[in-house]
Image (cartoon, rainbow, N blue to C red):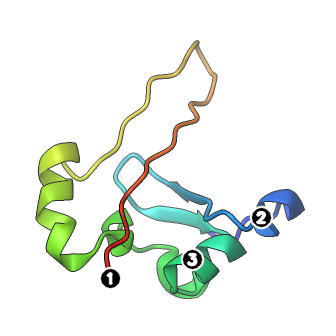
């Protein structure tokens, strides 16, 4: 598990985060560091609820069961999806 090795993803201003089906963060780009405030070293290996504000975590788990799932379009194909979480200060 490490930072993303793709230069286009790493240099993106957008926060790009990968996780396992169990919600464990496996990659975290520079945009995620800037937008969300945690260094990759801290985020990678943590649960995706790290990026959900404390007061919204119960709601997130209730809505998603702790997971965000996506269906693959075909055998052996990966799924791409976006999860938008409001960031509340």
* Distance CA(mark 1)–CA(mark 2): 23 Å
Badge 2 crowding class, 10 Å Cα cut-off, few under 14, some 14 to 19, many 20 or more, is: few
Q: Quick check: 66 left or right of 38?
A: left
The residue at the point 29 percent across, 47 percent down is: 67
Whether the residues at callouts 2 and 3 have beta carbons within 8 Å, the answer is: no
The residue at the point 37 percent across, 70 percent down is: 87
Q: Which residue is mark 1?
A: 89
- The answer to whether 12 is drawn above or below residue 61 in the figure is below
Q: Which residue is mark 3?
A: 35
Say which quarter of the image contains residue 34: bottom right
Give the percent coordinates (x, y) of residue 4.
73, 65
User: Which of the two discs, 1 and 2, sits closer to the camera?
Assistant: 1
Q: Nearer the viewer, residue 2 or 9?
A: 9
Whether the residues at callouts 1 and 2 have beta carbons within 8 Å, the answer is: no
Q: Quick check: 49 left or right of 71?
A: left
Give the percent coordinates (x, y) of residue 47.
35, 68
Q: Which residue is mark 2?
A: 12
Q: Residue furthest top?
A: 74
The residue at the point 60 percent across, 80 percent down is: 33
Circle 1 — which element?
Answer: loop
Badge 3 crowding class, 10 Å Cα cut-off, few under 14, some 14 to 19, many 20 or more, is: few
* Distance CA(mark 1)–CA(mark 3): 13 Å
Disc with the residue nearer the chain's start (1 vs 3): 3
* Distance CA(mark 2)–CA(mark 3): 11 Å
């Amino acid at each position: 598990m490490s930072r993303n090795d793709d230069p286009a993803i790493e240099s993106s201003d957008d926060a790009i985060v990968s996780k396992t089906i169990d919600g464990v963060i496996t990659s975290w780009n520079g945009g995620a560091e800037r937008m969300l405030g945690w260094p990759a070293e801290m985020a990678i290996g943590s649960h995706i609820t790290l990026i959900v504000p404390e007061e919204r975590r119960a709601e997130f788990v209730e809505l998603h069961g702790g997971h965000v799932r996506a269906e693959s379009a075909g055998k052996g194909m990966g799924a791409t999806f976006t999860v938008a979480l409001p960031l509340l200060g």
